[in-house]
Amino acid sequence: AIELLERLSPTEEVRALLAAARIGDAADVDHGALEEAVAADADDHAAALELAKARGAAGRYDEAFTMLLGIVEARVDESDAARLAMIDLFDLLGNEDPMVGQYRTKLATAIF
């Protein structure tokens, strides 16, 4: 589905569908194992990224945004992937959602 959607013109609807498909990939991960990995090693940014995406897939958007923003701010290898995951959540929720405006501003501040 992702490959097909990427071929279409990037309208708001296509971006939302593409974001939902990418975020949906994180729905089937073992939350418990990821939570344990993050609790055991705060510097395990790869596990934190996967946990944040899983929380986004579960509709726990504020938690996902907070974790993703922390990864971006840490300026680690996973920072760009965290930034892209935040953009997927922005596209999924739409510009009208107040969380999107709040976290878009925080992301811009973190990047610059």
Image (tube, grey):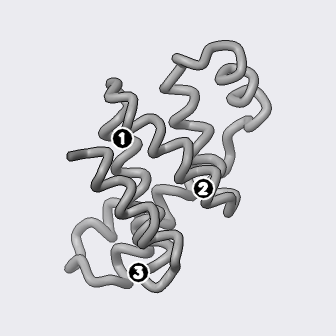
Residue annotated with mark 3: 95
Side of 61 where 23 appears, left or right:
left
- Location of the N terminus by quadrant is bottom left
Residue annotated with mark 1: 81
Front-most of residues 80 and 105: 105
Provide residue 54's location: percent of width, then percent of height: 63, 47
SS at mark 2? helix
> Quick one: label 1 or label 3, which is nearer the N terminus?
1
Provide residue 26's location: percent of width, then percent of height: 58, 47
* Tag 1 near tag 3, CB within 8 Å: no
Instruction: Give the vertical position of 78 relative to 110 (above or below).
Output: above
Identity of the amino acid at label 1? Ala
- Measured in 3D between alpha carbons, the distance from the residue under mark 1 to the one under mark 2, in whole angstroms, is 14 Å
> Quick one: label 3 or label 2, which is nearer the N terminus?
2
Provide residue 5's location: percent of width, then percent of height: 33, 70
Identity of the amino acid at label 2? Gly
Q: Residues within 10 Å of mark 2 (few under 14, many from 20)?
A: many
Q: Residue drawn at (47%, 63%), measured in percent from left and top?
A: 89
Instruction: Give the vertical position of 41 relative to 56 (above or below).
Output: above
Front-most of residues 52 and 30: 52
* Tag 1 near tag 2, CB within 8 Å: no
Task: Give the number of the mark in front: 1 or 3.
Answer: 3
Residue annotated with mark 2: 56
> Quick one: label 1 or label 2, which is nearer the N terminus?
2
